[in-house]
Image (cartoon, rainbow, N blue to C red):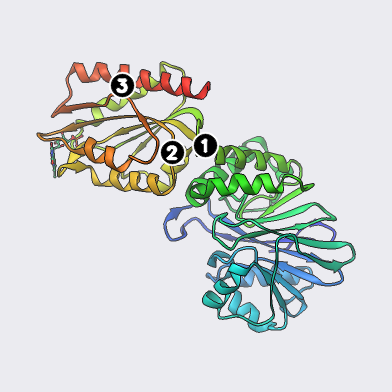
């Protein structure tokens, strides 16, 4: 693999993690992910972020450095925007090759560097707005952007090229294979990376949406010509496209999100399942797009993205041991953790005798600012009454969503 030139003296060093891995040990990545480091060369050379110590990835990274005639000994400064191990777990090995390189990072990152990598020498703690002049017109400015998504995060801006090294912000899933920049993407590839950005956002960043909005606001004064994130495509033709996408994603927290509905359903013996088609038909009759996921077949990492983007959520689940069907409880607990807030919601489901799923659902979602419409709950197999109600309530929920999105 070779380094990818962004502009004179600025290179991306991407390594791809393949799809069999779970990101953060839990998120499926059917299309893999890239981990991007960057080189900025003036009279002195800075390396921005590093990579995970996994498989033969460090060898790929070394080969990319070698392709532009650099090795660890040639790095004067290491800039650590973020300490998460996907960017730093190889650092102890790399650092041992050149312990003299100076490391720039935030005050909070300093302690993490010691705790995660055992490194505390040649460390320079930046203050927001500090600059580092590399010579030959290359100047780096550091901006503290806490909680996007760890507490120690910062971004680095190179002013002569207008490049923002944004770390995890503006990132996406999806490996980089021969295509690295937005201007090399076909329309469908462009849509692919925006979707991969949404899924990445919903999995990794959504809980910190307030900080994302603040960070974007904060950086709006910069003349950003290139967004160079630590995961996914580099945006140089239209950086505003990914800024706008992230602004939209962050705005979904308080809603409305898109005029779409996500149906998430589960069923042991098919009684709840019998209503799914009518529910979907009811939503469609209002002209809204509908995304359907069965639990536990579909992983919550995939469901989160469509739930985050949809203003309406419909939950199909039976009662199980006086509570919710357990795989749905897991999905809903993840919704609570990831702040799937401000939605219009309908629940339907069969019970045998006591019911109980609705009660637990009400408790679990108490703080999510969800507005429920009348649920459809019945004993045993559904009759025509429930099948008709499914059409009606699906439509009613869709109409509520349309109203919400028109505000
Ligand atoms: C293991 C198990 C536990 C159940 N616990 C309850 C319960 O606590 N209360 C209740 O009303 N029904 C309970 N039921 C009955 C189911 O809710 C009922 O069979 C329902 O029709 C299942 O819907 P499904 O066909 O969509 O899976 C239980 C069923 C099973 C298999």
Q: Nearer the viewer, residue 130 or 67?
A: 130
Quarter holding the N terminus?
A: bottom right
Q: Nearer the viewer, residue 81 or 268?
A: 81
- Whether 54 is drawn above or below 158: the answer is below
Q: Which residue bears the numbered disc 3?
A: 278
Q: Which residue is mark 2?
A: 341
For the residue labelled by badge 3, is the local secondary structure a helix, a strand or a loop? helix
- The CA span between labels 2 and 3 is 26 Å
Please state if 87 lies on the left or on the right of 355 as rendered.
Answer: right
**Closer-to-camera residue (69/291):** 291
Say which residue appears at 11% left-offset and 35% top-offset.
354
Q: Is residue 71 above or below residue 224?
A: below
Mark sitting earlier along the chain (2/3): 3
Mark 2 vs mark 3: in front: 2
Per the image, label 2 sits on a secondary structure element best described as: loop
* Residue at mark 1: 252
**Residue 198 visible in the shown view:** yes
Q: Is mark 3 within 8 Å of ligand 1?
A: no
Neighbours of disc 3 within 10 Å: few (<14), some (14-19), many (20+)? many
Residue found at x 56% / y 50%: 173
Task: Tell me: 148 left or right of 399.
Answer: right
Residue drawn where x is 69% and y is 42% of the image: 185
């Amino acid at each position: 693999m070779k380094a990818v030139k962004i502009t004179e003296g600025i290179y991306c060093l991407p390594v791809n993690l393949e799809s069999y891995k779970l990101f953060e040990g839990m998120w499926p990545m059917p299309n893999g992910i890239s981990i991007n480091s960057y080189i900025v060369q003036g009279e002195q050379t800075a390396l921005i972020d590093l990579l995970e110590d996994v498989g033969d990835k460090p060898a790929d990274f070394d080969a990319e450095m070698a392709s532009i005639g650099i090795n660890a000994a040639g790095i004067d400064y290491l800039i650590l925007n973020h300490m998460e191990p996907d960017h730093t777990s190889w650092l102890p090995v790399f650092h041992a090759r050149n312990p003299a390189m100076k490391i720039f990072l935030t005050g909070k990152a300093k302690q993490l560097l010691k705790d995660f990598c055992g490194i505390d020498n040649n460390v320079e703690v930046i203050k927001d707005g500090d600059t580092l002049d590399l010579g030959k017109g290359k100047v780096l400015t550091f901006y503290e952007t806490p909680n996007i998504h760890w507490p120690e995060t910062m971004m680095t801006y190179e002013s002569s090229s207008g490049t923002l090294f944004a770390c995890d912000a503006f990132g996406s899933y999806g490996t980089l294979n021969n295509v690295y920049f937005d201007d090399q993407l076909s329309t469908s590839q462009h849509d692919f990376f925006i979707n991969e950005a949404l899924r990445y956002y919903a999995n990794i960043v959504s809980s910190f949406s307030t900080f994302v909005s603040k960070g974007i606001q904060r950086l709006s004064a910069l003349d950003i010509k290139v967004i160079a994130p630590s995961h996914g495509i580099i945006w140089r033709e239209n950086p505003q496209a990914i800024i706008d996408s992230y602004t939209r994603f962050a705005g979904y927290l308080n809603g409305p999100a898109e005029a779409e509905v996500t149906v998430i359903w589960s069923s042991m013996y098919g009684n709840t399942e019998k209503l799914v088609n009518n529910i979907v038909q009811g939503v469609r009759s209002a002209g809204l797009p509908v995304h359907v996921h069965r639990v536990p077949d579909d992983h919550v990492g995939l469901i989160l993205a469509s739930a985050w983007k949809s203003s309406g959520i419909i939950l199909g689940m039976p009662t199980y041991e006086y509570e919710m069907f357990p795989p749905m409880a897991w999905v809903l607990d993840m919704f609570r953790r990831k702040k799937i807030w401000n939605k219009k919601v309908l629940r339907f489901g069969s019970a045998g005798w006591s019911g109980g799923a609705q009660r637990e659902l009400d408790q679990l979602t108490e703080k999510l600012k969800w507005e429920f419409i009348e649920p459809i709950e019945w004993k045993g197999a559904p009759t025509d009454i429930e099948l008709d109600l499914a059409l009606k309530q699906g439509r009613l929920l869709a109409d509520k969503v349309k109203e919400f999105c028109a505000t």
